[in-house]
Image (spheres, rainbow, N blue to C red):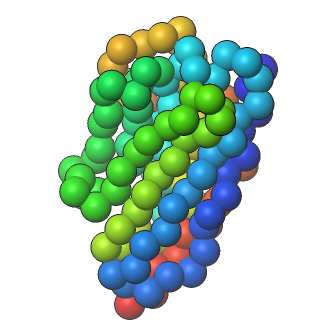
Amino acid sequence: QVQLVESGGGLVQAGGSLRLSCAASGRTFGNYAMGWFRQAPGKERECVAAISWSGTNTYYTPSVKGRFTISRDNAKNTVYLQMNSLKPEDTAVYYCAKAALFATAVPGTREYEYDGWGQGTQVTVSS
């Protein structure tokens, strides 16, 4: 089983930037798509960004397209989420997740498509 540990969250002013990291244990990290999800108070968890096992294909929810960038370094077993031009509505707990299926070319965006989750990291954007 892959274990995931997120870091990099914090408090930032609107317009600022944060870089989230997700370190994965296990030798099979590079074989699976990865996703970043977020959950704001009172809202459902949503997929913010996802990346295929090779890094070739990515997905962004429309509200973050052009501001967030997902990337991965399979040699370091790490996936990143660079968040720029942050807005108060980006405030949420951010989770990284590992895809359930092996080597999917198109990363999934639904929770059921992921079977490993980190503990989450809080991102708070003040206005």
60, 73: nearer the viewer:
73
Q: Residue at x 36, y 51 (%)?
A: 69
Q: Residue furthest bottom?
A: 127
Q: How many marks?
A: 0
Q: Is residue 30 left or right of residue 89?
A: right
Q: Is residue 69 left or right of residue 25?
A: left
Q: Residue at x 40, y 63 (%)?
A: 83
Q: Is residue 46 visible?
A: no
In the image, residue 65 sits, relative to residue 12, either above or below, namely above
The C terminus - image quarter? bottom left
Q: Position of residue 39 (x, y in %)?
A: 51, 56
The N terminus - image quarter? top right
Q: Residue furthest front?
A: 75
Q: Is residue 74 left or right of residue 67?
A: right
Q: Is residue 66 visible?
A: yes
> Residue 57, located in which quarter of the rendered image?
top left
Q: Position of residue 93 (x, y in %)?
A: 57, 60
Q: Residue at x 40, y 36 (%)?
A: 50
> Residue 20, located in which quarter of the rendered image?
bottom right
Q: Position of residue 98 (x, y in %)?
A: 58, 28
In the image, residue 66 sits, relative to residue 24, either above or below, namely below
In the image, residue 116 sits, relative to residue 42, either above or below, namely above
> Residue 51, located in which quarter of the rendered image?
top left
Q: Residue at x 41, y 45 (%)?
A: 70
Q: Position of residue 44 (x, y in %)?
A: 46, 50
Q: Is residue 15 left or right of residue 111?
A: left
